[in-house]
Amino acid sequence: MTKSRNTTLIVLAFFAIYVIWGSTYLLNKVAVLELAPFMLASFRFTTAGILIFILARLMGIPIRITKRQWVNTIFAGFLFLSFGNGVVVWALRYVDTGFAALEISAQPLIILLMMRALEGKKIRPMSFVGVVFGIIGIYLLVSQKQVVSKENSVLGMMMIFACMLSWAYGSIFVAKADLPSNYFVNTGYQMFTGGIILAIMSFGFGEDWTSPVYWSFNVKLVMGLLVVFGSILAFTSFNYLLKVVSPEKVATSTYVNPIVAMLLGWYFLKEEITAQSIVAAVVLLTGVYFINTKKTLAIFERFKK
């Protein structure tokens, strides 16, 4: 009975990181057409952070952290959420959801190259093959006339790439940083502080803030889904899976998210899926596979130290 229950939980958790995370591109795209990007992301993560703290207290989980951990969560929140996610939301005004998801799927490639540049990490032969595939895939993706001809699309692509650099450095940083030992509390602090920084960024860029009372029904629905499912449930599922299954299986979300995003964007937003995008996806995700088969295990081993 217990084994059956655990299997059910694992299946549901995989559904969360596959489908829910893959759908956040669509949800953000719908919301950003009505709301200012940094304001949108700020509301999402600040609200999620507060809800996590409330849940932690109800579950009897201590939320007190040290000064060093506080500073580190602020920095991690900025790298992953304030810049890393907030700017992606902004870029979705200019690029399709499927394109954004595919470009971001090259994240393992960026982490690999950054670890080589900053730490002198040796690139294994299989990973080097992945790098080659990844570079070819990115070129095929961004060189499409249908993409680069859209207004501000090149700017959107560049900003997403900048976010990937931020995520890559964040991944290296958190591997060594002193952070709250409880993953739920750690996530709550990163989301709350990242959301506050996003609010400061929003005011700095002169964005107009509107009360949720005046949001359309679709945006209210989308925001609720982003907070509850895209933030709290998906991140909790991700951390749960890291405890009960092997890391390389969890990393398969890297391959599934872009496919989900492309299909949802095509179905709901009528976004075009070109033949070159499909070829780019196959080449790019093949590169990610080669990198992850060797690199993912190494990264998670560092987290255990």
Image (tube, rainbow, N blue to C red):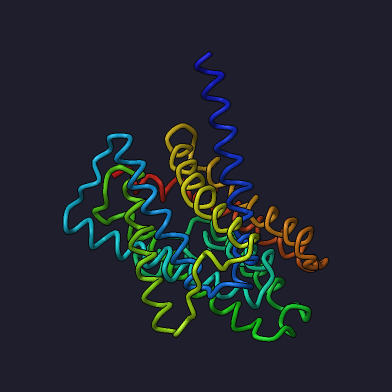
Whether 38 is drawn above or below 235: the answer is: below
* Up-down relation of residue 244 to residue 134 (above or below): above
Q: How many marks?
A: 0
Q: Position of residue 185 (x, y in %)?
A: 32, 47
Identify the residue at the far front of this view.
213
Return the x and y of residue 33 as percentages of the image width and height: 64, 73
User: In this orientation, which residue lies closer to the viewer: 168 or 220?
Assistant: 220
- Residue 140 figure quarter: bottom right
Looking at this view, is 66 or 64 the one in front?
A: 64
Image position of 105 (left or right of 201)? right
Farthest right residue in view = 275
Image spot of residue 57 (x, y percent): 29, 40
Q: Residue at x 31, y 65 (%)?
A: 75
Q: Quadrant of residue 206?
A: bottom left
**Above or below, 35 relative to 52:** below
Q: Residue at (49%, 36%) from the top-left corner?
A: 246
The location of residue 126, given as percent across then percent down, is: 56, 54
**Residue 269 visible (yes or no):** yes
In terms of image quadrants, where is residue 183? top left
Q: Is residue 299 left or right of residue 61?
A: right
Visible residue check, residue 132:
no
Residue at x-position 49% and y-position 56%:
124
Quadrant that contains the C terminus:
top left
Which of 124 and 7 lies nearest the eye of the viewer?
A: 7
Which residue is pictured at 26% across the width and 61% down the height?
Answer: 72
- Left/right of residue 153 with respect to residue 179 in the rendered view: right
Residue most extreme to the top = 1
